Amino acid sequence: MNEYEVIRATMINEEFGWIGFVADLYGEYMHDVQDFDVKVEQATKYRSNPELFNGRVQAAIDTLKENPNVDSSKIAIIGYCLGK
């Protein structure tokens, strides 16, 4: 998760009136990783383990559903690259 994703979530809110939510799949200690090898290692970790990846995505969805302003029947996901 970085500033770009936060900006995009804010744009979704401002342009459409939707709730923009940024899910951090990598965890709080990976926010500002600059080392390319670490980025590749983390992306590979999630790409190669669908159960781990899907569990993190589902946890984000579950968290979003707890928001009283969210209609849980109308949740959409925008994904950004887990690649190199």
Image: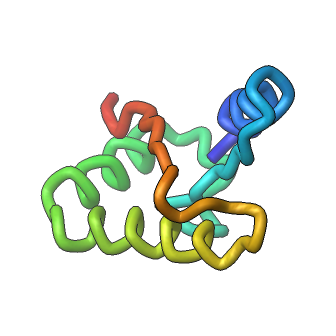
Quarter containing the C terminus:
top left
Q: Is residue 25 above or below residue 15?
A: below
Q: Is residue 62 above or below residue 73?
A: below
Task: Name the side, left or right, on which 76 lies relative to 81.
Answer: right
Q: Which residue corresponds to the image point at 66% horizontal and 54% vertical from the top-left?
A: 31
Q: Quadrant of residue 3?
A: top right
Image coordinates of residue 27 in percent, x first then y, are 56, 68
Q: How many labels does the image show?
A: 0
Q: In which quarter of the image is residue 64?
A: bottom right
Q: Is residue 70 above or below residue 83?
A: below
Q: Nearer the viewer, residue 82 or 13?
A: 13
Task: Name the side, left or right, on which 68 lies relative to 38.
Answer: right
Q: Which residue corresponds to the image point at 70% horizontal and 28% vertical from the top-left?
A: 8
Task: Name the side, left or right, on which 14 lies relative to 37.
Answer: right
Image coordinates of residue 12 in percent, x first then y, are 72, 29
Given the current orientation, which residue lies at the most extreme right position?
Answer: 14
Image coordinates of residue 45 in percent, x first then y, are 25, 59
Given the current orientation, which residue lies at the most extreme top position?
Answer: 15
Image coordinates of residue 71 in percent, x first then y, are 61, 60
Q: Which of 48 and 66 is in front in this view?
A: 66
Residue 20 visible in the picture = yes
Q: Which residue corresponds to the image point at 32% horizontal and 74% vertical from the top-left?
A: 55
Q: Nearer the viewer, residue 61 or 39?
A: 61
Task: Name the side, left or right, on which 46 lies relative to 79.
Answer: left
Q: Which of 79 and 32 is in front in this view?
A: 79
Q: Which residue corresponds to the image point at 64% horizontal and 67% vertical from the top-left?
A: 29
Residue 3 visible in the picture = no
Which colour style is shown? rainbow
